[in-house]
Image: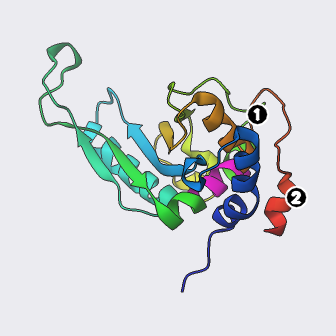
């Protein structure tokens, strides 16, 4: 049997009871939790689009540890020199163990090495408790070897939660250790994460 990821164990032991008390829910199934994480990378208007998609595919697979899917254009747009069905980028949907491990690496290793990092925006919620974060450079992830980077790629990371409101989603991510810019300390201390 595989060991439980440290962040998931931390969620079950510390974060879930904290959220239950803070949000005043009685049913265990009402406690917000993370459903999935979607990593989406678009190569945009690059001259060698096919090679750029290949590079994005390799980098996203290296970072997430899961095979990525190539996204294609749904319709032709002449102004962008785009044909229908042309590859535009890649995406991967993480669930379960890979999702928890990716989130832990993102919050503890990748985000803190961003130059002049002051925290992520606490406002990037969609109104239903889901959070989207933009990353401008893939080199912040420890899995990427800097000398092998062929081109700079940015991607969106969408964290889908079962929270019904932005406040509940924000409280969930803050308790898990997401470094929000508003400097409110996490309700559950990070030293407890390391001990988990």
- Residue drawn at the location 36% of the way across and 61% of the way down: 67
As measured in the structure, the alpha-carbon distance from the residue carrying label 2 to the one carrying label 1 is 21 Å
Q: Quadrant of residue 7?
A: bottom right
- Extent of the magenta region: 102-108
Q: Position of residue 114 (x, y in %)?
A: 71, 39
Q: Position of residue 77 (x, y in %)?
A: 16, 18
Camera-side residue of 10 and 102: 10
The dot on residue 191 is 2
Do the CB atoms of the residues marked 2 and 1 lie less than 8 Å apart?
no
* Picture layout, residue 58 above or below residue 116: below
Q: Main secondary structure of the magenta part?
A: helix
Disc 2: CA contacts within 10 A as few (<14), some (14-19) or many (>=20) = few
Q: Residue furthest front?
A: 26
Q: Position of residue 120 (x, y in %)?
A: 69, 31
Q: Quadrant of residue 66?
A: bottom left
Q: Is residue 179 magenta?
A: no
The dot on residue 57 is none
Q: Is residue 106 magenta?
A: yes
Q: Is residue 152 visible?
A: no
* Picture layout, residue 64 above or below residue 118: below
- Residue drawn at the location 48% of the way across and 38% of the way down: 155
Task: Tell which tag, 2 or 1, sits nearer the viewer.
Answer: 2
Specify the quadrant that holds the C terminus. Answer: bottom right
Q: Secondary structure at mark 2?
A: helix
Task: Using residue 27 as the reference point, say whether residue 79 is left or right of it.
Answer: left
Camera-side residue of 187 and 135: 187
Specify the quadrant that holds the N terminus. Answer: bottom right
Task: Using residue 101 as the reference point, say whether residue 154 is left or right of it.
Answer: left
According to the image, label 1 marks what residue? 117
């Amino acid at each position: 049997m595989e060991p439980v990821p440290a962040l998931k164990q931390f969620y079950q032991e510390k974060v879930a009871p904290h959220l239950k008390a803070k949000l005043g829910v009685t049913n265990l199934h009402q406690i917000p939790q993370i459903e999935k994480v979607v990593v989406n990378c678009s190569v945009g208007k690059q001259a060698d689009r096919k090679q750029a998609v290949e590079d994005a595919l390799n980098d996203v697979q290296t970072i997430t540890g899961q095979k990525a899917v190539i996204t294609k254009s749904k319709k032709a747009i002449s102004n962008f020199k785009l044909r229908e069905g042309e590859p535009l980028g890649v995406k991967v949907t993480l669930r379960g163990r890979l999702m928890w491990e990716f989130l832990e690496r993102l919050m503890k290793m990748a985000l803190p090495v961003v130059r002049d990092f002051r925290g992520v925006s606490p406002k990037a919620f969609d109104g239903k408790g889901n959070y989207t974060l933009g990353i401008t450079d893939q080199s912040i992830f420890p899995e990427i070897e800097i000398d092998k980077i062929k081109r700079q790629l940015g991607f969106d990371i969408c964290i889908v939660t079962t929270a019904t409101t932005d406040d509940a989603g924000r409280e969930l991510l803050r308790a898990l250790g997401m470094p929000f810019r508003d400097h409110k300390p996490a309700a559950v201390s990070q030293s407890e994460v390391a001990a988990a």
